[in-house]
Amino acid sequence: MTFTEQCITIGLCTLASVLTRALPFLLLSEKKPTPPMVRYLGNVLPAAVFGMLVVYCLKDTTFFSGNHGLPELAGILVTAMLHLKFRQMLLSIGGGTAVYMLLIQCIFIP
């Protein structure tokens, strides 16, 4: 890739990032009520993304060999318990990730 092509690529990526962040503010007015579809997506997308993360994280886990997926299951359990108790997504994901990383780095060493 030439320098010019690199500059154009970086510029287009920057433009796309700015547009995706600014477009909702440009299209949706504070004076008008939020469209029902946008409210619906705001309600269902966080859970859908969380579900996709779980599926993605478990796609290569082997439950019938090695450590039988114990670190992964422990991380999921901690994440679920923290979320049910505190209802804080960042705390839940961070806590589950910390438990998983501690288990694979200190206990289930490959």
Image: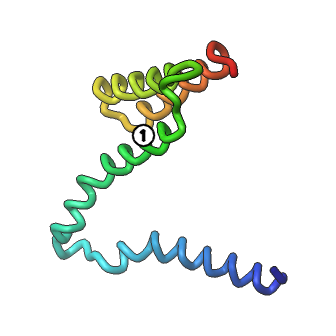
Q: Quadrant of the N terminus?
A: bottom right
Residue 45 pos. (x, y %): 31, 54
Residue 66 pos. (x, y %): 59, 20
Camera-side residue: 88 or 9?
9
Which residue appears at 69% of the width and 79% of the height?
A: 9
Describe residue 63's horizontal placement relative to residue 1 as left or right: left
Amino acid type at mark 1: Val
Secondary structure of the residue carrying numbered label 1: helix
Which residue appears at 41% of the width and 31% of the height?
A: 92
Camera-side residue: 17 or 101?
101
Which residue appears at 54% of the width and 71% of the height?
A: 17
Residue 97 pos. (x, y %): 52, 30
Q: How many marks?
A: 1
Describe residue 78's horizontal placement relative to residue 35 as left or right: right
Which residue appears at 44% of the width and 37% of the height?
A: 90
Q: Can I make out residue 95 in this image?
A: no
> Does residue 105 lie above or below 16 as drawn?
above
Camera-side residue: 57 or 61?
61
